[in-house]
Image: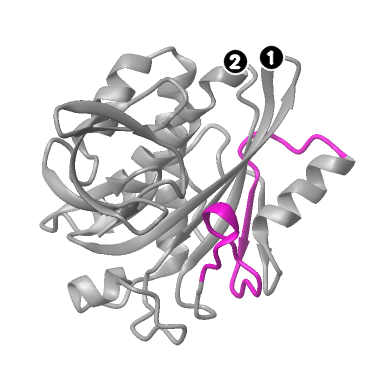
Amino acid sequence: MRRPNTLFVGQAFFDLPQVESTNAYALELLSKSKPAEGTVISTHRQTAGRGQIGSSWESEPDKNISLSVIFYPDFLAVKDQFLLNIFVSLAVFDFVKNCLPDRPISIKWPNDIYVGHLKIGGILLQNSLINTQIRSTVVGIGININQTTFLTNPPNPTSLSLESSQVFNLTELIPTLCEFLESRFLQLKAGKIVPLQHEYLQHLYRFAMPANYQRPNGAPFVGTITGIDESGRLKLEVEGKTEVFDLKEIKFI
């Protein structure tokens, strides 16, 4: 694999044949030492990958990107931790757009990556907090690259290969992803908060478009995404009033 053109992301690299979870492996490293910022744990086969709120993530061995990256965003207050979702989502958006420049790419709140109405990537952040600051974060990223069959039949999967009819070289793609991650992280560290928030909304799936949603009790409704609040909750206009929703409090139909 080529060395990424970065200052730190991917310069320390663990290439594991198999692991239950790259996030769990990264958290174990953090419990024993302080790995270099930007340390990447990548695997060819992840046997217990997770998505948001404990959902599973299917990845065929040797076909996809399954990795975690360690960051130390101690310049952020706990109340601002959704900014981590924003920088990572934009980095993965950049990566997918770079691979599929002619396809419609978007970020489905809070941090899934979509091609059209199909999911190509997911992100799981696990933060360690100390007092009012963020001590570390483990950024888990799964991106469907060359997988074309999904055995667990998730509702709407796609991959770079399905979208382009090409086979991609993972050893070339991973360094590129590292470069996009570092670029967005340095933007965040430099305090470019407003531009990051603006871009996130600009690329948000269904932003400013009336669409169908469902409440936890199954009740359907029509709403229009208008933004994200300071806690990262989704803001929708519903029948002329603003409502906010946390994870699992709203279903996209």
Residue 236, quarter of picture? top left
In front here: 216 or 7?
216
The amino acid on which the numbered mark 1 sits, given as a three-letter code, is Thr
Q: Is residue 208 visible?
A: yes
- Which residue appears at 54% of the width and 80% of the height? 61
Tell whether position 54 is magenta: yes
> Where does the image place residue 9, in percent across and percent down from the top left?
55, 39
Residue 237: assigned label: none
Give SS at disc 2.
Answer: loop
- In this picture, which residue range is highlighted in magenta? 33-57
Residue 132: assigned label: 1
In front here: 59 or 12?
59
Residue identifier under label 2: 77
> Where does the image place residue 76, in percent across and percent down from the top left?
57, 17
237 w.r.t. 4: above or below: above
* In the displayed structure image, the side of residue 197 where residue 122 appears, left or right: right
- Which residue appears at 47% of the width and 25% of the height? 231
Tell whether position 161 is magenta: no
107 w.r.t. 41: above or below: above
Pointers 2 and 1 in contact (C-beta within 8 Å): yes
- Which residue appears at 49% of the width and 31% of the height? 84
Q: Residues within 10 Å of mark 1 (few under 14, many from 20)?
A: few
How far apart in space, not on screen, are marks 2 and 1 (Cα)? Answer: 6 Å
189 w.r.t. 154: above or below: above
> Where does the image place residue 144, in percent across and percent down from the top left?
39, 68
In front here: 142 or 168?
142
Give SS at disc 1.
Answer: loop
